[in-house]
Amino acid sequence: MVRQRAGRDRLERIARQDARAVGFTAAVDVDHATRDRPADAWTEALRGLAGVYVRSFGGLGRFTAISVRGSTAAQVQVLYEGVPVEDAVGGSVDLSMLSADVVDLAVVHRGYVPVRYGGAAIGGALRLSSDMNGTFADRIRLGLGSFGAYELRGSVRRRIGGKGPTLTAAAAVAGAEGDFPYLDPGAPHDRFDDRTRTRRNNDYGRISARLAVAGRRRRARWFLTPIGQIRDRGIPGPAGARWDGARESERLGWVVAGADAPLPRPGSTVGARLSARGSLRTFRDPEGSVGLGRNDQVQASTDTFGRATTRLAAWRGAFVELSGDGRVETTRIEDRLAAPGRAPRNVRLRFGTGIELEQSFVDGRWVLAIGDRIEALESRFEGDPTAPVATDAATTMRFGHTPRAGLRVRPHPSVRLRATAGRYFRPPTFVELFGDRGYAVGNDDLVPETGWNVDGGLSFDVDAGEGTRLVGSAAGFYTRARDLITWVQAGFVTRAENVPGAHVAGAEAQLDGRLLGGTLETHAAYTFLHTVNLDQDPARHGNPLPGRPAHQGTFALDVAPKTVVDGVLLVPRVGYEAEIVAATNLDPSGRYVLPPRIFHAITFGVAAGCCLVMSLSVRNVADRRTAYVRPPVDNLDGPIRVPIADVLGYPLPGRSLWFSAAVTLPRGGRGG
């Protein structure tokens, strides 16, 4: 019954999120997704969601970010337990820093984003959370894989006192060598200089720990969770350049606390979230292989956040939610080779307040949500007289206004129709405002990016009983982004500038099913994108946006019949997964289009009783590592062979194996 319960929980979570949301959402049960993957590869499960595209620098532990409906990575709001994760320095969130050891559920909001989650979500929002009140059990997981990959994870859950709070403790150690073979194509005009190399300096190691205390006091729920992580990794460079000496390390300490309590009026609640985070990142490039010279940089950051929300029952069928939040970020970046001990201080203050009205009609079959949010942010930069071009102290003020609305209609108990629209904005980061490394110069006159989102479609949840259930959705969407922030070449300097923006239109569909009494599970998703670059440069204007595939599809099938042997329930399992990506433009001119690529994966597993689960997964079964392309280069007599790569030419590994075994010792009961 282990396998059946896991499948039912997964579909139930998807359906539950869909039933509560005004806009389109999709949920990933991270624990379920990492049965056959390393904890640091849980983001691969996001690839299977409609409208979501995952970008990475290739291999485990590499920088990973997501794009939703053709957005940039910086336009996706990422939250952990309701707390924003992105920082003011770079904007984009590296999802590889949050492993499955701290994340149990991932929910993607596509289009409409509730006001309480902020106004920076031009593309959407990714909301991550932990299960702090689950079944009492002790668990240990061991994983081994290709290219030196390994992990050892353990967790325990206890109740403090007879009916006291629940304590969860988890720790993990993981890493990989990342020494997979790849093709170095050399010069495009010379087919005889192609050679197969072994990836070097692609290793990483991680140690992480998390405590979570959660409980109730009267009818209020509260939690406190400190997280610590140490990670070290090499920076190998793209396929055509080897960065053997560049390395990056990170030390992270984070405490998140929250509480929610009901108010006397039915349906009314009050809640709060508090967060304090500190990180220390170091980047060392003693050979000067990455930039223009040797580098030894230290970035120390602090981040404090607080939010309060109140949901009040107003009149019949109506609820009003009020939210307010504040955030203070400080960053010091010291270049120890250029100016030891001199680190200019960057500070960003951000405050927001919002209101959202939710009105239901006809016994809840019609739900209308209207919200608005106002944000103010101030960015302060001390100035750096030691930079290649001396910079003075600077301060910028920005204001954001993000109205949004959504309508959900339930014409049938199993069907929901949706239509939403909203305006969102993303402020420029410190690097975009004040960055100055000689060849890359910020611009403190930048205005925030803004975007209007419109979508419409339907979702359904058909439960036919006897282990048969289908949950799916289909939607069309359109986004008009303005004042996009991009880096524009001006002579020998690259400068951050606002450009007119882009149009993004598309369609998406997703289906999850459980059939034959739970023996068969299936998943399918497809996304079509049509993008138009509105850059004023004639070479770019009207072309597709680079890095966004026009077609992306996923199909997965899982067969798990149940049998009893000597009184022990055995659930053998065979799974198949295919992912296809096609029509991806690599450059803004629209001349370099990557060929379609399809990856296959096969999994064999078994669950014995309630306590043991083992699996062996083979990814990229066909070992596809190269493809033929015709680049926009003169004097070529045909297509050339290149490595299959993700962002910025970082090659992807070929065939890989992953074996995992998990032992669970149930103790009975549930937390909270």
Image (cartoon, helix red, strand yellow):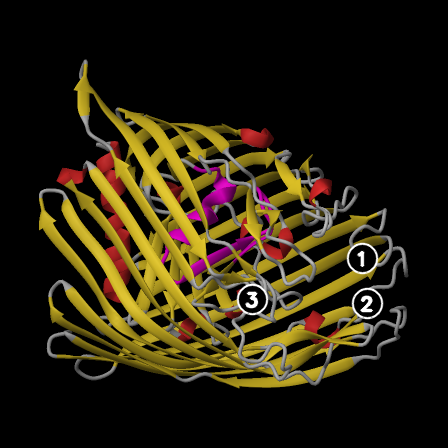
Residue 222, position as x, y percentages in the image: 39, 56
Badge 1 amino acid:
Gly
- Residue under label 1: 291
Badge 3 amino acid:
Pro
Q: Secondary structure at mark 2?
A: loop
Q: Is residue 111 left or right of residue 147?
A: left
Q: Nearer the viewer, residue 549 or 230?
A: 549
The quadrant holding residue 341 is: bottom right
Q: Are marks 2 and 1 in contact (CB under 8 Å)?
A: yes
- Residue under label 3: 546
Whichever of labels 2 and 1 marks the residue nearer the N terminus, that label is 1
Q: Nearer the viewer, residue 540 or 79?
A: 540
| Residue 437 numbered tag | 2
What is the spatial separation of the Cα atoms under label 1 and label 3, in whole angstroms?
Answer: 23 Å
Badge 2 amino acid:
Arg
Q: Secondary structure at mark 1?
A: loop
Q: Is residue 117 visible?
A: yes
Residue 537 vertical placement versus 432 (above, below): below
